[in-house]
Image (cartoon, rainbow, N blue to C red):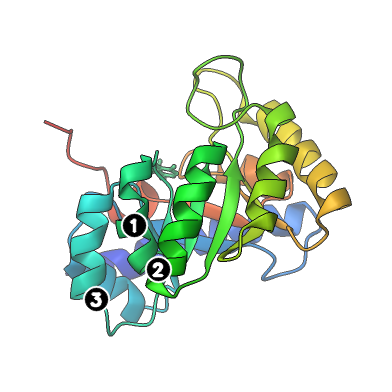
Amino acid sequence: MSRRHQLAANLEAVHRRIDRAADKAGRVPGAVTLVVITKTWPADDVRTLAALGVEHVGENRDQEATLKAEELVSTPLCWHFVGQLQTNKARSVASYTDVVESVDRLRLVGALDNAAGSAGRFLRCLVQVSLQEGEGRGGAQPQEVPRLADGIEDADHLGLAGVMAVAPLGAPPEAAFARLAEVARRLREDHPQADMISAGMSGDLEAAVACGATHVRVGSAVLGDRPPVG
Ligand SMILES: *Cc1c(COP(=O)(O)O)cnc(C)c1O
């Protein structure tokens, strides 16, 4: 099977999973947007995905994403940044990213605002929420979300779009995604337009859709298993 056929078949299977989960949850068709996470896969794959109708792609490393975004500058795509982000990478990320999903501290808000301002760009931002105590899989603790949200809203070149989370490892994802839905509900009380909930990956997208995710971030179920990082 050609790579294009393989990607088309995988995409179709993922869309079926999303549709079935949305239907089961009584949500309207089209309520969930697929963001294909293309990290470790070549720009050629991203180009093929775009030709197959994918509109949103996500990356988690600035260096790799920069090269792909440059190569695909004339392909209409919405680029999401989903990885841990150091402030010294803000300038680079702001040059090609449309949605930064991993905003987890105020210092990063300032750096992204400055970077977007000097690039003449506007960045939509999600507050990444940690769904477990301690270090976990990144993100701010739920009680820090209002301060970060206000910081993003006060920034001239950033817009608050909602929240993002990764489910903790080794625990059922439903409880975690339900907590995220509650954080999102409280956020919308102060910021009604911040209605995006990015949750769910290849292994747990059904649970995320059941808990109200508006965006799922799917890598391996579309592109295949990533080669082990050396
Ligand atoms: C890699 C990654 C994904 C996609 O994971 P898969 O299990 O391959 O679907 C989603 N979100 C983030 C933040 C990631 O880094």
- Binning the other alpha carbons within 10 Å of mark 3 as few (below 14), some (14 to 19) or many (20 upward) gives some
Residue type (three-letter) at the residue carrying disc 2:
Ser
Q: Nearer the viewer, mark 1 or mark 2?
A: 2
* Residue for point 46% across, 73% down: 121
The mark that comes first in sequence, 1 or 2, is 1
Q: Is mark 1 within 8 Å of ligand 1?
A: no
* Residue for point 65% across, 40% down: 207
Secondary element at image label 2: helix
Image position of 110 with respect to 160: above or below: above
Residue that numbered label 1 is attached to: 91
- Binning the other alpha carbons within 10 Å of mark 2 as few (below 14), some (14 to 19) or many (20 upward) gives few
Image position of 23 with respect to 121: above or below: above
Secondary element at image label 3: loop
Of residues 138 and 51, which is closer to you in this image? Answer: 138
Where is residue 4, by image quadrant?
Answer: bottom left
Residue 112, percent from left and from top: 46, 54
Residue 197, percent from left and from top: 66, 51
Residue that numbered label 2 is attached to: 118
Residue that numbered label 3 is attached to: 72
Quadrant housing the C terminus: top left
- Binning the other alpha carbons within 10 Å of mark 1 as few (below 14), some (14 to 19) or many (20 upward) gives some
Q: Is residue 53 visible?
A: yes
Image position of 74 with respect to 50: above or below: below
